[in-house]
Amino acid sequence: MVNHEQETPRDLERYLRPSSPVPVAWPTICEAVNAVTGTAGPADLKISGVSLNPQTVQPGDVFLAISGAKRHGAQFLSAALRHGARAVITDTRGSEIIGPEPGVPVAVVTDVRAVAATVAATIYGTNLRTPELFAVTGTNGKTTTTFMIRALLEALGRATGIVGTIEMSARGKIIPSVLTTPEATQLHGVLGRMTEQDVDSVAMEVSSHSLSYGRVDGLEFAVSGYTNLTQDHLDLHGSMDDYFATKARLFTPGRSRRAVVLVDDHYGRKLAAEAGIEVQGLSLDAANADAYWTVSTIHASGLGHTFTLASRDGVQLRARTGLPGAFNVANAALALAMVLASGADPAAVQQALDSRDPFSLSVPGRMQVVAERPVAVVDFAHNSDALAKALDSLPVTAAGRRIIVFGATGERDTSKRPDMGAVAARHADVVIVTDDDPHDEAPGPIRDQVEAGARQAIEADGLEVELHNVAPRDRAVEFAVSLANAEDAILVAGRGHEVYQEVAGIDVSLDDREELAKSLAKHGYTPVSAFAQSIE
């Protein structure tokens, strides 16, 4: 097995593009980006790849020299040439830095980042062909929904890929990467690679960051889905209105052909009303006459639920998800409706649901069950709405308590810290505030802000809640288990699948799932089989 952790970014870049690219003539690329000026170069000059980073350039690439926050990419041309760049695309300032004798052809454009997707699409052929693309956007639920879409498509016999926070893979084989969200150049390269491997369908998370920074430019999604919109990323967007407007870009002609939108929140209804493409509304309210798809007959089934999805035109499908929480019913219903909106035959879909149970998969760090008695779950919930929903989804007996371990991320939207504390106090019986990823911020004051929000809610609402402030995080997890009995439910929230905690620029090994499993075993409880094996 290859140990990809030992590979450099330049090594890993090879996995993010076709293995056998078809070189493209340099004039064709210049024409595609409407270069203002540029040197023609040799008549037979061909380009086989593209990179924004001089450290990931491969032989035969065009290097895109972009103006950064502190330095211009043109200042690193020598490194790009050393690694094999055969041409450069830059802006006017970049051409001035490069000078009159760069040694390779230079094309000048007004905005390099704006043409990055066009360059990549031209080189990797994604302007002509891609797999069928499914996009999921929203604050919460993107990862789980894309995993569910992939699982259902696989159950239908499709060759699938996925691009998201947790995983990038083609036909079940992981594509290594050093980025959570690929740049536009890499995303087109990955899709070119998937096409080369005969992948016919790809489920993709589309974040507000990827829309803001043009990372999905040049792609048209067959079906795009919307989950919900709650306070998050306001450090980037500034306001909820701007956050919504950024998400709404996905639901416009040229980016998506059709959409399925959960219309159970204000922003979902607004999006469905204002989108410039065909929208099918989806609601968990069976009486919602405005929704094309509605969910009914929701019944508990183990830790999950069974449900029925019905269309306004009389289509009905029975489905099940083994993941806890009504929000996972919403995620499963959205995945199901999106696949149906792509043209899948309802009878074939029902057969796949019955025979493969595709929505009962385990999604790493997304309501991932570590133990069943006590119920112990790890989830990525890192904002107020997600915390409330995750806590409310935990099944407890009348004698049981809900225990939560969580913190807030450093150097991010500070306004949500006290809100998260307040929500935890209102939805849990025992609140243990700890560290998330402090980054370069002092962790103690972050905890204090979260704790203050919880304490204020306890006092204002007269709540009988235990409140603790415990660090470091592994000790907080162990403390939670020490307080629990078999009737309780424990939620460790905020980091999900992540295996490193960033503290003052240092990555500290820490996996909430492993820490929770070890603590459960230490106190005489039995983790589920996958985690029991990991601690033997």
Image (spheres, rainbow, N blue to C red):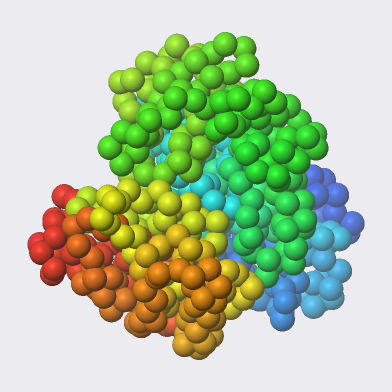
Residue at the image position 33 percent from the left and 20 percent from the top: 354
Q: Compared with residue 451, is residue 494 higher up or lower down, i.e. above or below?
A: above
Q: Where does the image place residue 124, in percent across and percent down from the top left?
A: 61, 43
> Would residue 378 be found to the left or right of residue 69 on screen?
left
> Would residue 208 be found to the left or right of residue 464 on screen?
right
> Would residue 45 be found to the left or right of residue 528 on screen?
right
Q: Quadrant of the C terminus?
A: bottom left
Q: Quadrant of the N terminus?
A: bottom left
Residue at the image position 65 percent from the left and 43 percent from the top: 265
Q: Where does the image place residue 223, in percent across and percent down from the top left?
A: 62, 31
Residue at the image position 10 percent from the left and 64 percent from the top: 524
Q: 206 or 271, which is in the foreground?
A: 271
Q: Where does the image place residue 521, in percent across and percent down from the top left?
A: 14, 64
Q: 200 or 299, which is in the foreground?
A: 299
Q: Compared with residue 382, is residue 263 higher up or lower down, i.e. above or below?
A: above
Q: Is residue 176 visible?
A: no
Q: Compared with residue 7, is residue 447 higher up or lower down, i.e. above or below?
A: below
Q: Where does the image place residue 213, in percent across and percent down from the top left?
A: 70, 58
The total of numbered circles placed on residues is 0
Name the quadrant containing residue 11.
Answer: bottom left
Q: 378 or 349, which is in the foreground?
A: 378
Name the quadrant containing residue 340.
Answer: top right
Q: Is residue 269 visible?
A: yes
Name the quadrant containing residue 236.
Answer: bottom right
Outermost residue, front side: 462
